[in-house]
């Protein structure tokens, strides 16, 4: 049975559209309410009058699960069960009928009431499932706000009587939030229609390289065999005529083997390793930039056009075996974000990639809207989008409901109707994001503020207002302080939490304390999630495995719906508040660890050994507290994200502190011929530039960007020497040094910097054996946020592990904003004696 809830004070419900004429959808607008016919209520069939369900003999797993949900919610609401049968047209029944896809495309459905029979029509199980949950939500008041055992709650039904004729179609034909729990996705009518992930590595495979190496890219004069890896394999040579034929044949082979398939992805690999030969240079010249990155849109989508001509215009693979239109999909990703200057083949589906969480930046928001409109006008029949709704791995409440609502409405009105977004579930910190997005993907014209009113009031009861204040403070603070937009800003950044000051986190904890008090919970108070102060102590359901919404529910009769707030409801509200509070405690402990780490690093540059020792002890204590809680939380909470989605790589500043705290000075023998990084000339890697200094023994690898430059250090005492890095997307300065196992070494560097939020500058080391295999690696230093105008001396001591033969040192700088720099006047590695 599902838990019961009394009426609440403010709600807006999912809009269903009534078309009283033709059942075809075309471009007809969607109305905002379920609109019954004008017949008196007594003459229309009421939901409680239904007695049975008639479905075809064959049921998919998803349809069976949806029917189970309908039967259970109906029984809980109305006190009697719905019987199930596989044939006939009995009275007082829901009767499922299948029709042509052209009539009910992409999960659309119709509900027709004829006397005491209700016919549910769709072209697929998806359409039927969508109709089932429309009935469950609108006529029974069922809501699945989260996944799992706490996710279900009742709302007042929007209406009891069936309309005589009702048709509905979703605004977005694809509505996928990856990897949100599959039960949640089904219950909130999310789906997956088209394929468009990185795929060229599968088409241009290692096997193909053996027979046709000429179609693979030459990157900086080298053509390396691919490894079949979409993350590291370069793109093929998109200007080569044979590459077009290979891609077209791969698509045709796929469609031939899968007659019902409606799409084939030719999206670029997840990198910017494009061919750098003269032919590609000519194709992208004169070079243009967009958001500081090279503009390769015409190169990539010109290739897509040529492939589409062969697949569709010449081979005629226009439709699936069911008559559905087919597409070749391609990510408009990173270097291919900007709109094309060429027309796009109508059956090429561009997939716009944008972090619309950053619409808080007015310039970015305006530019992104123009970009959407330009792609819609490009000639492509269908435009998709890949958004970034994370969630984990961000260790704080990354709230942007305002921009979810505004962007979905704008895109829908502009003509975008396919959405994929990454949203690894971090339910306590994400709050309403998944449910709100699912609602608006079905109908973006809904009132998002009213939906949020419903969510807070219905799901948190007496704690609604303080919980709302908690999330809205997080959203407001992020909007006002995250600053200039950039590509998925702060993603997988160990110091992303620096966005939130301890003071604002304390204010947010105050709202949670008020929420806990409102539902009778003792404040979490940093106690973790053990037995003391846990949910078991207040009588709410223990945190366990994923459930279907049945656990912890009451066995109430329909009359209980009118009886006011029940003890089990209070327990559910308390359990949900506790999920939020426990998730936020992870935020607080992570913030304390990050604050103490940055304080330790700064102390190592400025303070005495005694102060450094105190800061080191504080950091180690904060890290231990975070790691202990992390293990408890990940292992105990049904609503924690998967470990792999929240675990962030961490720098380890103990070596920096050890250099300050060492009791005696040791002699240092340099293993570098040129610690001052003298410039031995200048060279451009390829036509993308820029001109870079040639350094003895050191190498520079980078992604090209508009303002990227590496010049001599401004603080070097050796003239044309050292390096100063500015405008970097990402750049790595690296080399190897020979080592001997179990010997003591030290890396030394003199550096100055300006590092803003999201700019990352760190030292990475890896120990290699004689065969070049990695024995171990670490990040012993991440430079702290802020400015150091004068050079700081940095020492990092190491002991080589067993079987070590080389040490690879990398200084990595990424995401530099205007004014950021890293200035290195000296870098040396040597043996300690």
Image (cartoon, helix red, strand yellow):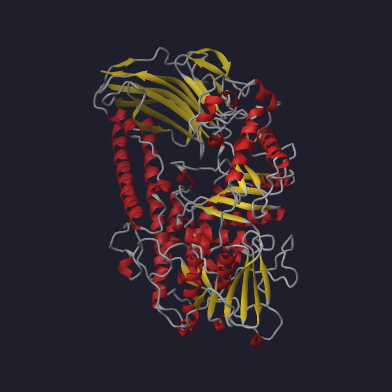
Horizontal side of residue 194 vs 530, given as left or right: right
Is 67 left or right of 104, judged from the image as shown?
left
Place of residue 508 in the rendered image (x, y in percent of width and height, measured from the top left)? 45, 57
Query: Which of these two is toward me, 290 or 675?
Result: 290
Q: Position of residue 27 (x, y in %)?
A: 74, 60
Residue 673 point in image, percent of width and height: 40, 12
Residue drawn where x is 57% and y is 58% of the image:
437
Judged left or right of residue 432, residue 667 is left
Residue 458: where, in percent of width, then height? 50, 71
Q: Quadrant of residue 528?
A: bottom left
Q: Which quadrant: the C terminus? A: top left
Q: Quadrant of the N terminus?
A: bottom left
Residue at x 62% of width, y 49% of height: 262
Q: Nearer the viewer, residue 330 or 347?
A: 347
- Whether residue 432 is visible to the viewer of this picture, yes or no, is no
Q: Tell me where residue 737 sits by quadrant.
A: top left
Relative vertical location of residue 17 with respect to residue 606 in this rendering, above or below = below
- Give the residue drawn at x 46%, y 18%: 698
Disc tally is 0
């Amino acid at each position: 049975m599902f838990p019961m809830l009394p009426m609440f004070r403010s709600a807006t419900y999912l809009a269903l559209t009534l078309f009283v004429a033709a059942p075809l959808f075309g471009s007809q607008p969607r109305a905002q309410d379920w609109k019954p016919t004008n017949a008196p209520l007594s003459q229309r069939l009421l939901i409680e009058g239904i007695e049975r369900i008639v479905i075809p003999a064959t049921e998919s797993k998803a349809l069976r699960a949806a029917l189970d949900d309908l039967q259970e919610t109906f029984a809980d609401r109305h006190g009697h069960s719905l019987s199930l049968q596989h044939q006939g047209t009995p009275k007082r029944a829901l009767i499922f009928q299948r029709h042509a896809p052209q009539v009910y495309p992409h999960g659309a459905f119709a509900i027709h009431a004829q006397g005491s029979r209700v016919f549910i029509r769709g072209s697929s199980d998806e359409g039927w499932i969508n109709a089932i949950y429309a009935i469950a939500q609108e006529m029974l008041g069922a809501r699945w706000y989260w996944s799992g055992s706490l996710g279900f709650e009742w709302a007042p039904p929007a209406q009891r009587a069936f309309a005589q004729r009702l048709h509905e179609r979703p605004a977005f034909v694809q509505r996928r939030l990856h990897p949100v729990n599959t039960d949640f996705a089904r219950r909130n009518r999310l789906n997956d229609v088209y394929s468009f992930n990185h795929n060229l590595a599968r088409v241009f495979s290692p096997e193909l390289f053996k027979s046709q190496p000429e179609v693979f890219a030459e990157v900086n004069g080298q053509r390396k065999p691919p490894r079949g890896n979409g993350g590291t394999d370069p793109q093929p040579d998109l200007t080569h005529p044979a590459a077009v034929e290979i891609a077209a044949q791969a698509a045709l082979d796929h469609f031939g083997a899968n007659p019902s398939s409606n799409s084939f992805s030719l999206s670029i690999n997840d990198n910017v390793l494009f061919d750098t030969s003269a032919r590609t240079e000519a194709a992208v010249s004169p070079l243009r930039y967009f958001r500081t990155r090279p503009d390769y849109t015409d190169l990539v989508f010109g290739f897509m056009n040529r492939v589409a001509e062969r697949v569709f215009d010449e081979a005629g693979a226009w439709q699936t075996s069911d008559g559905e239109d087919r597409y070749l999909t391609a990510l408009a990703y990173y270097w291919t974000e900007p709109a094309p200057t060429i027309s796009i083949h109508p059956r090429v589906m561009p997939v716009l990639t944008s972090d619309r969480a950053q619409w808080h930046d007015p310039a970015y928001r305006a530019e992104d809207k123009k970009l959407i409109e330009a792609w819609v006008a490009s000639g492509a029949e269908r435009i998709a989008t890949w958004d970034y709704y994370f969630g984990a791995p961000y260790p704080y409440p990354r709230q942007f409901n305002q921009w979810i609502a505004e962007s979905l409405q704008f895109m829908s009105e502009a003509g975008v109707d396919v959405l994929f977004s990454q949203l690894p579930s971090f339910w306590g910190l994400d709050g309403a994001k998944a449910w709100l997005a699912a609602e608006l993907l079905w109908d973006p014209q809904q009132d998002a503020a009213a939906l949020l009113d419903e969510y807070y009031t219905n799901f948190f009861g007496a704690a609604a207002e303080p919980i709302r204040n908690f999330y809205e403070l997080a959203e407001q603070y992020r909007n006002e302080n995250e600053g200039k937009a950039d590509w998925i800003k702060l993603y997988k950044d160990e110091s992303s939490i620096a966005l939130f000051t301890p003071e604002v986190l304390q204010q947010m904890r105050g709202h949670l304390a008020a929420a806990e008090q409102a539902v009778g919970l003792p404040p979490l108070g940093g106690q973790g999630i053990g037995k003391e102060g846990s949910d078991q102590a207040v009588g709410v359901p223990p945190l366990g495995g994923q459930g279907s919404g049945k656990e912890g529910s009451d066995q109430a009769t329909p009359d209980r719906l009118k009886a006011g707030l029940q003890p089990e409801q209070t327990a559910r509200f308390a359990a949900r508040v506790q999920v939020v509070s426990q998730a936020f405690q992870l935020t607080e402990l992570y913030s304390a660890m990050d604050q103490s780490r940055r304080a330790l690093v700064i102390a190592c540059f400025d303070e005495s050994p005694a102060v450094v020792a105190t800061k080191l002890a504080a950091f180690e204590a904060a890290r231990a507290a975070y790691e202990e809680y992390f293990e408890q939380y990940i292992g105990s909470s049904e609503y924690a994200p998967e470990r792999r989605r929240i675990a962030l790589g961490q720098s380890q500043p103990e070596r920096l502190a050890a250099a300050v705290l060492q009791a005696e000075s040791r002699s240092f023998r340099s293993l570098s011929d040129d610690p001052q990084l003298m410039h031995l000339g200048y060279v451009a890697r390829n036509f993308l530039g820029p001109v870079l200094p040639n350094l003895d023994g050191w190498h520079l690898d980078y992604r090209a960007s508009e303002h990227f430059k590496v010049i001599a250090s401004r603080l070097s005492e050796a003239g044309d020497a050292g390096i100063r890095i500015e405008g970097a997307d990402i750049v790595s300065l690296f080399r190897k040094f020979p080592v001997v196992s179990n010997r003591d070494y030290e890396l030394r560097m003199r550096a100055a910097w300006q590092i803003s939020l999201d700019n990352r500058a760190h030292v990475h080391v890896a120990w290699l054996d004689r065969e070049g295999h990695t024995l171990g690696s670490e990040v012993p230093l991440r430079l702290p946020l802020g400015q150091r105008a004068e050079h700081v001396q940095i020492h990092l001591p190491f002991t080589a592990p067993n079987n070590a033969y080389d040490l690879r040192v990398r200084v990595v700088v990424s995401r530099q904003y205007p004014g950021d720099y890293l200035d290195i006047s000296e870098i040396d590695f040597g043996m300690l004696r």
